Every structure is written in structure tokens, then in C-alpha cells.
């Protein structure tokens, strides 16, 4: 169900503007959630990126056992953050 054509006149904006602003707001919310999770994982392990995490594995600063799930989660979140930023750039 597409409510944009019904809501846009109520807000006195074009349907296109409502759609673009709604999408931008949605992406910003997803980006903030993603960045929040990234921050929490980075703080937990004292790393700034997936590369930093991997380097700490190599040096033995972080034990591999019990941390692989967070390692892959961090990697996934960094990729998601990049995709969201790209999507935001595409709608501007």
C-alpha cells in the first residue's frame, strides 16, 4: 500500500519530496544503529576497524577463541555502513 500520494498533500509537499525525505530519514536511522553497534564492538576490543581487529589477532593481543563472531559482525557492520553511506549519496 502506497500512502505517499495521500499523505504528501496533507503535508503540502510533493510525493517525490516526501518519498526522498522519508528514504533519507530511514537510511540515517539505519546508519546510526549500525554506527552504534560498530562503536560498541570497537570499544569492547579496543579496535578502530576490522583491519585493526585482525592485526590484534596476529599479534595475539586478542584471543581468537570466542571472538570470531564479533570479528565477523564487525566486518559485516563496516560493509553495511559503507552501503548505507553510498545509498545516501545516491539520493542526494
Image (cartoon, rainbow, N blue to C red):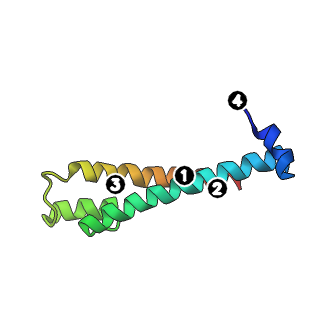
Real-space Cα separation, disc 4 to disc 2, in angstroms: 27 Å
- The numbered dot on residue 27 is none
Residue farthest top in this picture: 1
User: x, y (%) of residue 84?
Assistant: 54, 52
User: x, y (%) of residue 16?
Assistant: 80, 45
Tell me the quadrant of the picture where the C terminus can be found: bottom right
**Residue located at (79% from left, 50% from top):** 17
Mark 3 or mark 2: whose residue is earlier in sequence: 3
- The numbered dot on residue 84 is 1
Tell me the quadrant of the picture where the N terminus can be found: top right
- The numbered dot on residue 1 is 4
Which secondary structure, mark 2?
Answer: helix
Q: Disc 4 or disc 1, which is closer to the eye?
A: 4
Real-space Cα separation, disc 4 to disc 3, in angstroms: 35 Å
Mark 4 or mark 3: whose residue is earlier in sequence: 4
Mark 4 or mark 2: whose residue is earlier in sequence: 4
User: Is residue 85 at all visible to an observer of this figure?
Assistant: no
Which residue position is annotated with label 2? Answer: 89
Q: Quadrant of residue 3?
A: top right
Real-space Cα separation, disc 4 to disc 1, in angstroms: 25 Å
CB atoms at circles 4 and 1 under 8 Å apart? no
**Residue located at (29% from left, 65% from top):** 52
Q: Residues within 10 Å of mark 1 (few under 14, many from 20)?
A: some
Which residue position is annotated with label 3? Answer: 74
Which secondary structure, mark 3?
Answer: helix
Amino acid at each position: 500500500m502506497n500512502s505517499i500520494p495521500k499523505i504528501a498533500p496533507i503535508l503540502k509537499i510533493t510525493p517525490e519530496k516526501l518519498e526522498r525525505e522519508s528514504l533519507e530519514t530511514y537510511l540515517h536511522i539505519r546508519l546510526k544503529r549500525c554506527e552504534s553497534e560498530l562503536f560498541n564492538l570497537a570499544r569492547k576490543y579496543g579496535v578502530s576497524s576490522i583491519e585493526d581487529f585482525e592485526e590484534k589477532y596476529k599479534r595475539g593481543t586478542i584471543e581468537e577463541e570466542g571472538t570470531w563472531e564479533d570479528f565477523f559482525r564487525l566486518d559485516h557492520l563496516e560493509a553495511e555502513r559503507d552501503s548505507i553511506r553510498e545509498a545516501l549519496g545516491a539520493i542526494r
